[in-house]
Amino acid sequence: MKQHLNQLAIFGGPPLFATPLVVGQPDLSAPDRMLQRIQDVLNSGWITNNGPLVQQFEHEICRITGANHCVAVCNGTMALQIMAKAGGLTGEVIMPAFTFIATAHAMEWIGLKPVFADVDPATHTLDKESVRNCVTSDTSAILGVHLWGNPCDVDGLQKVADEFNLKLLFDACHAFGSRDRGRAIGTLGDAAAFSFHATKFVHSLEGGAILTQSAELADQMRLMRNFGITGLDSIESAGINGKLNDVAAAVGLTSLEFTAERIQHNRTLQLTYQSQLANCPGLRMLENTADNGGNGQYAVVLVDETEFGLSRDTLLQILRAEGVFARSYFVPGCHRAVPYASSEAHCPVPLTTTNSILESVLQLPVGPMVSLRTVGRIAGCLHWIQQHTSLIQQRLSTGVPVTSHPDDPATTSTSLPLAG
Ligand code: T4K
């Protein structure tokens, strides 16, 4: 543990972690089984176009989630787009602005208009009353996001969807294996889109899937992911190349084997962060109760600048210098990103909670590389920083050059924004 200010890595001390801990470290467990599966694919000569491993991947996903139908696709963004197309969406789609930009871009890219509603401060997911206030005669759907792997207000959103006769779709890209009071994410609403990107705890390098209980919707989505082709010489609809390949499915099948283990590990890490930071002034973990059904994919902290003594961004830079490559997802917020920032039509309601979260949120590392001891060291470091914020701030205000972690790709400048 640090004893003196000079030992902080931003002031030239040795970083706490020489090998950085990242948010979204790809999990490549069981490489032998993974490589054997890949070798089998290559030996078989059937590499893509709904090959046997893709079908097995879909089958396994249905088994784990209990969903009736799984349509595997090449990434989560494509899953969102095919889901929206098959769902017949038109005009406006209500979604949070506090999400990865892909949620909005996926809709915008296919000619739909993202309309941003505010989120609930307790969950960071869509607030149903704010959603209700966004509905117009052009609205065709609500796109709820199960952010951080925690279920959004499925029942509340369903009520609004029913009231205005809207489709209810979910961006479940963070939420594989999550449950909402016992109900598996992927079995609720009209359909849900998942990502199996390398940074997800279950991944297929790149990949995605749509889960639905509707056979009709699933058929439509299968058609769309393969150019609308129904036979050697027949094409039934417009479509796209949204296919997952079998090498990716081989990786995905191996990754799926660890689903339960990873969820349990990440949730334990979340709860450990929560208990170890409980008495750190100015830091609050996003609440994760033992039964909230989240998959534990993100450890989310909110920084109260006044109480903590440093801004979120200063804390982020101090942590990153120590080799704790925390993130501030999803700054700047979709509503402030191009092209949405240029038109107020995307923001018909105040996004007060969204804006407040965007100023204070950060994510700490979880995943197989992170042990309980690691969490203890990170929490200890956070406490130490909090106890020395005045001195840190004083030192920074002198304009002293600061050091970043040698492996940090994010660092381009040598001076910190002044704290306070
Ligand atoms: N909806 C939501 C709510 C989403 O979060 C996402 C994706 C989507 C939709 C769309 O799904 P996809 O079309 O992507 O399947 C990452 C991922 O690229 C993105 O998939 C994910 N969400 C988002 C939350 O995170 P970045 O910009 O943070 O990626 P990057 O390159 O900074 O990587 C994150 C960390 O992981 C870094 O610290 C480095 C580490 N990393 C990353 C890769 C790719 C590695 O150590 N090795 C690697 O190979 O977006």
Image (cartoon, helix red, strand yellow):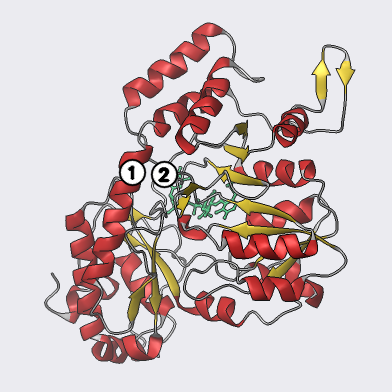
Looking at the picture, which amino acid does disc 2 mark?
Phe
Rendered image quadrant of residue 275: bottom left
Which residue is nearer to you in this view: 69 or 210?
69
x then y, percent, for residue 224: 77, 32
Instruction: Pick the residue in front: 327 or 279.
Output: 279
| Residue 142 x/y as whole percent | 71, 60
Residue 308, placed above or below residue 255: below
Q: What label sits on residue 201 in the rendered view?
A: 2
Q: Is residue 23 visible?
A: yes
Answer above or below: position of 7 versus 288.
below
Q: Which mark is residue 290?
A: none
- Left or right of residue 372: residue 223: right
Q: Secondary structure at mark 2?
A: loop
Instruction: Name which residue lies at 40% across and 51% down.
Output: 295
Q: Residue furthest top?
A: 44
Q: Quadrant of the C terminus?
A: bottom left
Q: Residues within 10 Å of mark 2 (few under 14, many from 20)?
A: many
Q: Where residue 137 sits: x, y (%)? A: 88, 67
Q: Which image quadrant: the N terminus?
A: bottom left
Task: Please give the name of the residue rendered at 40% of the width and 28% of the height, measured from the top-left corner.
Answer: 254
Name the residue rendered at 75%, 73% in the picture: 134
Could you tell me how far apart the alpha carbons at marks 1 and 2 are, in whole angstroms? 7 Å
Q: Is residue 195 left or right of residue 231?
A: left
Residue at image mark 1: 262
Percent coordinates x, y for residue 46 in the rendering: 59, 12
Q: Closest to the observer: 86 or 312?
A: 86
Identify the amino acid type marked 1: Arg
Answer yes or no: do the residues labelled 1 and 2 have beta carbons within 8 Å? Answer: yes
Front one among 415 and 150: 150
Q: In what element is the residue under mark 1?
A: helix
* First reached walking from the N terminus: tag 1 or tag 2: 2
